Amino acid sequence: MKVLLVDDERKFATMLAKRLALRGIDIEPVFTGEDAIAKAKTQRYNVAILDVKMPGIGGIELERKLKELDPGMKIIFLTGHGSKNDFEAGSAEAAFYLAKPIQIDELLTILNEVAG
Amino acid sequence: MNTTIDFENNDDLAFFGKVNASISHELKNILAIISEAAGLLQDLTEMMSRGQKIELEMLKTCSQDIVEEIQRGFTTIKQMNKFSHSVDAPLKSVNIIEVIDLMINLAGFLSFASKIRFDLPQDGASTVSTCPFRLQNLVYHTLVFAFKSVGVDGKIEIAVHRETNGSARIAFSGLGILGKQPFPSEETKKIAKSIGAEIRMAENSQAIDILVPQYSKNSV
């Protein structure tokens, strides 16, 4: 499973990527939506983990752009919103989401679920 | 001129709620980093206990990140506290520089915030007697408009000048043309009026002045 992690909080993305890599996940962190699109144009990712609120291209818009490049790519949203309801109000299409701070085991469960 | 802060007034309440929501989002981001750093330290400790080699540099980075994020958290909480206390008095002597500085920091939590150059006034005269909460509201809304006009890669400039009649002029310049929305909105005009302030937009829409009277009528 190849995973793309997109979050403008560099420290968060770097450390989460290290923790997932230690658990055997092939993951690449990037810090902007623009970089994520550039990566997705050159490599195929099974899953993208996207922060919802980012400067420039935010997570919701990025989901649409990544799906245009690869409709089969699965998306997991990371959000600082208080509750699932708050988040779903912003994106009705969100199938998987995790509220920050995240639990690594919960993320692994979702990753395995979306990757089938 | 009515400077009594009224939380039954939707504009006051909406502003208070909006700013607090963005502060809570910032604090969640900070806690998320601390949580990941602590989790990574735990992972590394477990690896060590299994006899696996770990990089010392990784331990140092994690510890340093925790220290830095705790400091960022304290700074954010200090700003939140200052903002919360701005509703304590409807009228008081206010240092405009401090108000702008606080609003720059709080508006900086917004995902669409752009860069700002804030020039400190040369004359040092920056105190007015006004409603601090409403002045903050006015500056914040102008910043939001300015951010949207230049985009995240843009840069706006802010300066404060003392006018001959004693009023303070907060000058926003370098505004762009992106996502142009009418400014000031009716709500913003209402806020300005409540503290006797005036908002002037340049004909080319690339500069905004907020004129704040030295004393509101209620204070003299």
Image (cartoon, coloured by chain):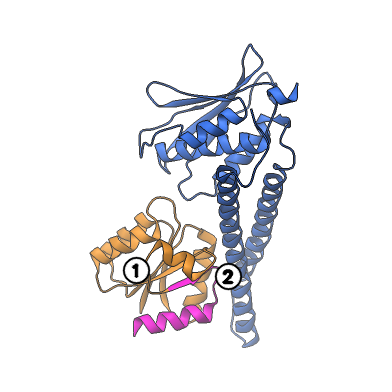
Chain colours: A orange, B blue
Report x, y in % for residue A115: 35, 82
User: Is A7 displayed left or right of B164 in the figure?
Assistant: left
Report x, y in % for residue B29: 56, 61
Report x, y in % for residue B220: 75, 21
Q: Chain of mark 1?
A: A
Asked whether residue A24 is in view, the answer is no
Question: Residue drawn 63% across and 11% down?
Answer: B164
Along the viewing direction, whichever of B100 and B123 lies nearer the viewer: B100
Q: Which mark is residue B41?
A: none
**Three-letter amino acid code at disc 1?**
Glu
Image quadrant of residue A66?
Answer: bottom left
Q: Which residues are magenta?
A: A97-116
User: Is A1 displayed left or right of B70 in the figure?
Assistant: left
Q: Which mark is residue B36?
A: 2
A111, above or below B140, in the image: below
The residue most toward the top is B164
Report x, y in % for residue A74: 33, 74
Q: Secondary structure at mark 2?
A: helix
**Three-letter amino acid code at disc 2?**
Glu
The residue to which callout 1 is attached is: A93
Closer to the observer: label 1 or label 2?
1
Looking at the figure, which quarter contains the N terminus of chain A?
A: bottom left
Q: Specify whether disc 1 shares its chain with disc 2.
A: no
The residue most toward the front is B8
